[in-house]
Image (spheres, grey):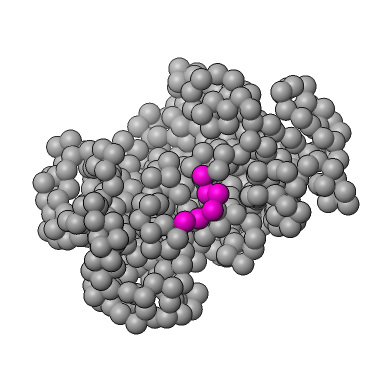
């Protein structure tokens, strides 16, 4: 599933992809769904890899569900073609903790762990603060909020180039100490009849549209009102399921007694409880992390959630292997009094339901793994920081490197692909929502809203070698 998803993402970015799949049914499905060559053979055999011409690839991605197969395949490719960069999907913490020297011995350049990526995603949003229809970015210094257009009087029925100055004028009047030489916030995407529009100055906002607004939290609070409890720390966390993702997350929690990031995130006073239906899994987690309360029970049975203190929980994390159960349990947790809840899903199937549920966040394992892989494979260090689930649109960011010919040039003089919008520029600690006259400087981090098909164009403009 992850392999097909990542292949689709790469193909949508106009890359040449060859897929190797041993299972005949999966290979047939991939061939029907993807516009690429699919080889129905064993990818851990040298002759298969030669048939696929793996030695001529820029990247070789081993994404099967077997750590050993992925390691062997990477080793075979690396042995015959040193210039090919290799990436292995790894689940076992033993392998994922290999040193650089050990990885080189196996012929692996990069290791990606789905469980670790999902655990990092949980920790990341907890650290930044989150709420329904609010997406925090850059440690909460920026926010993306989905709002109804009719709630902003300056937008409804007007073109953005006319509406934006009126809105900025109101902000300057209400907050005169803010700099006036830049836009304070920006409409980066418009949702209309289920379709997502990357807007330009000519885009007219209709009353029934929903708008993704990007800005600093204080500016968005000024326009839309504050979001209650978005930055409230989670002192009591209830986790449902003792999966590999939960084991990674709890392992990070056990390090919180030490100073540093995790201590800042959770602190010494945070209390974590884990509910697990399987007796052996519950005992294994309890033995590994004695600082965590482990409750053996089935969260779907009446009284188990209530007895675990769900009503007093600041956050409920639903992370079983069943994504449907996770969504239902997260919804139920909010009904029973939990302040916030999030659910882990294996794919993007249920993401469109997020806006109609009382769940504060959905985390797709497939999406976080794909984002990690694409960041590594893309040229110019283009990193996805948010993917709009309504369409093939992403908010990506990249850094203007030393010596880049783009440094010192205004945005209006850079020929960007169509369906691309420069959303923000981070310059040190300053966040700029730019216009055409904004000049890029070296070390600027530039946020861009782009359709998938335009990513390759951004790569050619902002340059850089693969993965560097």
> Relative to 373, does residue 416 appear above or below in the rendering?
below
Q: What stretch of residues is rendered in magenta?
A: 226-231
Residue at screen point 25% across, 62% down: 173
> Relative to 443, does residue 196 appear above or below in the rendering?
below
Res 420 quadrant in image: bottom left
**Which image quadrant: the C terminus?**
top left
**Image location (x, y in percent) of residue 107:** 47, 26
* Along the line of sight, the residue nearer the viewer: 63 or 122: 122
Is 164 in the magenta?
no
Residue 91 visible? The answer is: no
**Image location (x, y in percent) of residue 168:** 26, 64
Is 227 in the magenta?
yes
**Image location (x, y in percent) of residue 297:** 86, 40
**Image location (x, y in percent) of residue 315:** 65, 44
Q: Is residue 70 left or right of residue 463?
A: right
> Relative to 32, does residue 60 appear above or below in the rendering?
above
Q: Is residue 305 left or right of residue 376?
A: right
Residue at screen point 54% across, 53% down: 228
């Amino acid at each position: 599933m992850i392999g097909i998803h990542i292949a689709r993402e790469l193909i949508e970015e106009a890359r040449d992809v060859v897929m190797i799949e041993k299972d005949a049914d999966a290979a047939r499905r991939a061939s029907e769904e993807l516009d690429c060559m699919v080889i129905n053979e064993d990818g851990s055999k040298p002759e298969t890899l030669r048939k696929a011409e793996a030695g001529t690839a820029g990247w070789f991605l081993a994404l099967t569900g077997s750590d050993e197969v992925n390691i062997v395949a990477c080793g075979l490719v690396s042995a015959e073609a040193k210039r090919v960069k290799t990436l292995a999907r790894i689940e076992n913490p033993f392998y994922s903790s290999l040193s650089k020297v050990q990885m080189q011995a196996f012929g692996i350049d990069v290791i990606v762990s789905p469980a670790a990526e999902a655990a990092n995603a949980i920790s990341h949003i907890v650290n930044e603060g989150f709420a329904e229809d609010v997406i925090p970015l850059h440690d909460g210094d920026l926010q993306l909020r989905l709002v109804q257009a009719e709630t902003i009087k300056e937008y409804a029925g007007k073109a953005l180039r006319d509406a934006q100055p009126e809105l900025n004028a109101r902000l300057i009047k209400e907050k005169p100490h803010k700099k006036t030489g830049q836009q304070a916030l920006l409409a980066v995407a418009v949702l209309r009849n289920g379709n997502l529009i990357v807007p330009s100055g000519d885009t007219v906002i209709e009353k029934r549209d929903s708008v993704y607004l990007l800005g600093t939290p204080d500016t968005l609070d000024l326009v839309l009102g504050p979001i209650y409890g978005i930055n409230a720390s989670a002192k009591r966390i209830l986790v449902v399921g003792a999966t590999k993702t939960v084991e990674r997350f709890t392992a990070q929690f056990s390090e919180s007694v030490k100073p540093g990031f995790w201590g800042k995130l959770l602190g010494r006073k945070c209390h974590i409880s884990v509910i697990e239906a399987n007796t052996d899994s519950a005992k294994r987690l309890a033995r590994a992390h004695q600082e965590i309360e482990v409750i053996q029970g089935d969260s779907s049975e009446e009284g188990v959630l209530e007895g675990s203190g769900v009503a007093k929980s600041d956050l409920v994390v639903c992370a079983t292997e069943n994504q449907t159960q996770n969504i239902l349990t997260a919804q139920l947790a909010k009904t029973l009094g939990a302040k916030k809840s999030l659910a882990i899903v294996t794919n993007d199937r249920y993401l469109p339901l997020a806006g109609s549920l009382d769940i504060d966040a959905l985390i797709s394992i497939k999406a976080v793994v794909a984002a990690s892989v694409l960041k590594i494979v893309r040229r110019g260090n283009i990193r996805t920081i948010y993917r709009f689930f309504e369409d093939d649109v992403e908010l990506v960011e990249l850094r203007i490197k030393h010596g880049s010919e783009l440094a010192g040039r205004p945005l209006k003089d850079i020929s960007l692909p169509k369906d691309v919008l420069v959303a923000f520029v981070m310059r040190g600690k300053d966040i700029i929502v730019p216009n055409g006259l904004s000049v890029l400087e070296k070390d600027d981090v530039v946020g861009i809203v782009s359709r998938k098909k335009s990513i390759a164009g951004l790569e050619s403009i902002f340059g850089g070698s693969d993965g560097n």
